[in-house]
Amino acid sequence: MLGENIKSVTHMDNVKLSEDGKSVVIIDQTQLPNRMEYITLSTAKEIWDAIYLLQVRGAPAIGICAGYGIYCLALQIESQEYEAFAKEFHEKKEYLNSSRPTAVNLSWALNRMEKVVLSNSDQSVEKILELLKQECKAIHEEDIAMCKAISEYGLTLIKDGDGILTHCNAGPLATSRYGTALGPLFLGKEKGMNFKVFSDETRPLLQGARLTSFELCKAGIDVTLICDNMASIVMKNGWVQACFVGCDRVAANGDTANKIGTSGVAILAKYYDIPFYVLGPTSTIDMNCKTGEDIQIELRKPEEIKEKFYLEPMALSEVKCYNPAFDVTNHELITGIVTEKGICYPPYTESLANLFK
Ligand code: MRU
């Protein structure tokens, strides 16, 4: 289990290559907070399942796992002939890409890896494998740097003693090192600042209860766990000075897909006049999506609502369920989008486009 200090939390190796360099090793997030278990993923099915089952989750962490994963699968391709290698690589990439649809980091990382294959058709397969290894490591290293920069920008938005409400988990487990939405809180704590964090439990998969409150608590940050439907009362009580959330895909106009329930938090924040910030790396901004209407929302199984975490089912088996994993927060509700390149403010169509110039 983790030690009780900030560094043990901000320096968790949640996704890495195995020692022999042939498999991906992840912290199985479904076992937290009760067990810190590492699992090794070697086959395409194991990697697909780990992403689908949220053993590895959080947009940036999914991208990092997919990068390492497709590299490990590329090592298993027998053909040393370029055309056959590239074809099999593409098939494996498409398979991994089908595991979850909403977080753009999955396809972003896989496309980045495939670009290495496609732009080196004149090289030997051995050389391409070497370049693929460099690329997946670069994806990971860049994420570490992006999280740190986001944390620094985010910290400028809050002051010592503030109450911060967060939804889902956008901390070290979901990313690399500091995290995105939680990054300013870890960084502030390192500098001697104290915040009072309210963590929505995040129904139905409880990322807030199982992961966010675990990370913050282990880092010695004051965290209070609340059920999702308690956000309004803590805001009304005057205990929240800002909302910080992560993102899975940000459209060109600033509409933001994040964990189901995020848009409700944003609507409440608007009512109570509390600033609502989205924090995420530019790898989560999808300029190909003009608005949130273009973002595919993952629908998951009814059992997650009716049965998971309960000793017996909490609804009749014939009861219908609607279980979207994400919702889209309208850009008009977002005070600012904090990226590693700076803080974007409305109009987002302009400020986000400027990031990619
Ligand atoms: O279904 P999950 O747990 O993968 O959803 C994760 C989120 O919604 C996070 O807020 C988002 O990926 C940002 S992680 C930095």
Image: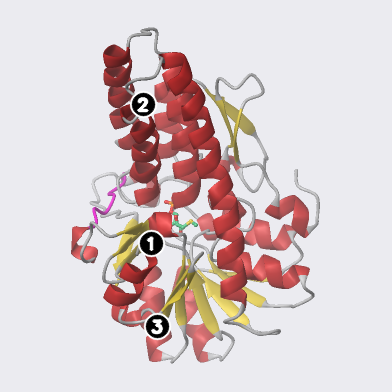
Instruction: Mark 1 and ligand 1: say if the CB distance to the nearest ligand atom is below 8 Å.
Output: yes
At label 3, the amino acid type is: Leu
Whole-number angstrom distance, CA of label 2 to CA of label 1: 35 Å
Quarter of the figure with the C terminus: bottom left
At label 2, the amino acid type is: Asn
Number of numbered discs: 3
* Residue ID for mark 1: 258
Q: Name the residue at 23% across, 46% down.
A: 318
Q: Residues within 10 Å of mark 1 (few under 14, many from 20)?
A: many
Q: Nearer the viewer, mark 3 or mark 1?
A: 1
Whole-number angstrom distance, CA of label 3 to CA of label 1: 16 Å
Location of residue 349 by image quarter: bottom left
* Residue ID for mark 3: 268
**Residues in magenta?**
295-301
N-terminal of the pair, mark 2 or mark 1, is 2
Q: Name the residue at 68% across, 78% down.
A: 195
